Amino acid sequence: MSLTTLEPVPRLLSRVRAELAAAFDCARPIRISRAPGRLDVMGGIAEYTGSIVCQATLDRAVAVALQPRADRLLQIFSFNLLDENLPFTFNISIDHLAEANVDALCKEFAAPGRHWAAYIAGCLYQMHQNQLIDLNASSTTGLNLAVLGTVPEGVGVGSSAALEVATMMNLIDHFSLRDKVDPMQIATMCQEVEHRIVGAPCGIVDPMSSCQGEADALLCVLCQPHEIRPTLVFPAGIRVVGINSNVRQSDGGMYDQTRCAAFMGHTIIVNKMRQMGQAGGRTLMSDPMGGHLANLDPDDYKRLFRPYLPQSIVGEKFLADFGPTIDTATTVDAKTNYHVLQATDHHVLEAGRVRHFVELISAAGRAPSRSREQGALLDKAGHLMYASHLSYTNDAKLGADECDLLVRLARDRERQGLYGARITGAGGGGTVAVLCDINQSADACIAELLAEYEKQIGKEPEAFLGSSPGAWHVGTVIL
């Protein structure tokens, strides 16, 4: 698959040549990179409690054009990050970026009209911080960067990760660093940009998927903290598609509350394990789960520990009884009432669902194509997606009515080539992943589903039907 033929690369090049001739010298080489968005197929927020997470790459992507300057200015052009048609420009000196305090830099990028540039300039800053490049060196010149994306923002398909990975890949090849980094380091630096410069406590799986994902397959990551498992290839004639509800994600703080509640459940379970160990004549001073709820057997959880979890608990009482949790991204608020039982249910049982899902898809790939055996395995995998969606909505409390409707519409058509569906990403809106056949019947079902959704909700949905390789696999090209 040639990078130059993958969208939106041709559109980016066309617009650079037509609109940015004053900044880009089109007679000189321009380096191009591209990174896709991603579709969270199974696992989702269970990433932070150690589950396997399965993600697919989309054909929607971000493309970046880079050309060195003769001065010390970083000039960034966005064709559509703030407005679909109106370009925006951001300038910052390399000297200022090299010497800036990270807190001051965050405040600068938080100013109106500048937030989008944090994802891009932050990559250069983070490479300097990690000592991969020296922005103070006289040999380090400024850059022109132009960005065009087709990954919708705010609908849970990794738009920010795609932007960062595309930028980071371009910078790495520009500075001839490919032999000094690997995809995991790229993803880690992108996560650091989110945490330190953008101010978003994101996980690492999104940039890993955008960087290392493969077309028409699932990247499987064991998040303890991030171990790549064998790629999960779909059986012939099977795919996942995404359906954008056209409702932006808005969890109202519930995402952080659910995460915190899950770690509160973890703390209570570890405390109970220690009590059980002491009663048996030995003391368990460490955590038998290794810090991850995903390592707790679901049957042991239900039988031994679930009965001791409170349905809910006020933060003040939890802190008095158990102290803080091990989570570094959330803090127990004394006045908040946390839904500990349901949040813990979701994370422990979701990890089991994902493990089973991987086993079923793998077995379906080994079964005779289009056989009754394969169909039964795919049906079971699809029903795990439905169970995941229900738990996400009722236990994690991160559902959205519009996504519930999309899942119901998919389930109404599960005998017509659609096997399963679930909400993706951080919930509260966004996108639904659908496991389905690749044929005209399934295509017709998807079209019917889209039309019925628009009729009932009054919003036009969008289907993500294609897949494309991650940025590491296609690299960059100089044109």
Image (cartoon, rainbow, N blue to C red):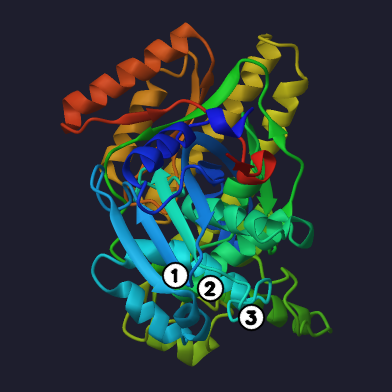
Secondary structure type for disc 2: helix
Secondary structure type for disc 3: helix
Between disc 1 and disc 2, the foreground one is 1
Quote the CA–CA distance across marks 2 and 3.
42 Å
Name the N-terminal-most of marks 2 and 3.
Answer: 2
Residue 42 location, x and y as percent? 56, 43
**Mark sitting on residue 271:** 3
Q: Nearer the viewer, residue 45 or 336?
A: 45
Figure quadrant of residue 339: bottom left
Residue name at image x 56 percent, y 48 percent: 43
Q: Quadrant of the N terminus?
A: top right
Whether residue 275 is visible here, answered yes or no, is: yes
Tell me: residue 85, above or below residue 44: above
Residue farthest toward the front in the current orientation of the protein: 27
Q: Which residue is mark 2?
A: 125
**Mark sitting on residue 73:** 1
The amino acid beneath tag 2 is: Tyr
Q: Nearer the viewer, residue 96 or 404?
A: 96
Residue farthest toward the right in the current orientation of the protein: 281
Quote the CA–CA distance across marks 1 and 2.
13 Å
State left or right for residue 370 relative to residue 97. Answer: right
Dot 3 surroundings within 10 Å: few (below 14), some, or many (20 or more)?
some
Residue name at image x 63 percent, y 79 percent: 137
Dot 2 surroundings within 10 Å: few (below 14), some, or many (20 or more)?
many
Name the N-terminal-most of marks 1 and 2.
Answer: 1
Residue 297 location, x and y as percent? 70, 56
Residue 35 location, x and y as percent? 54, 44
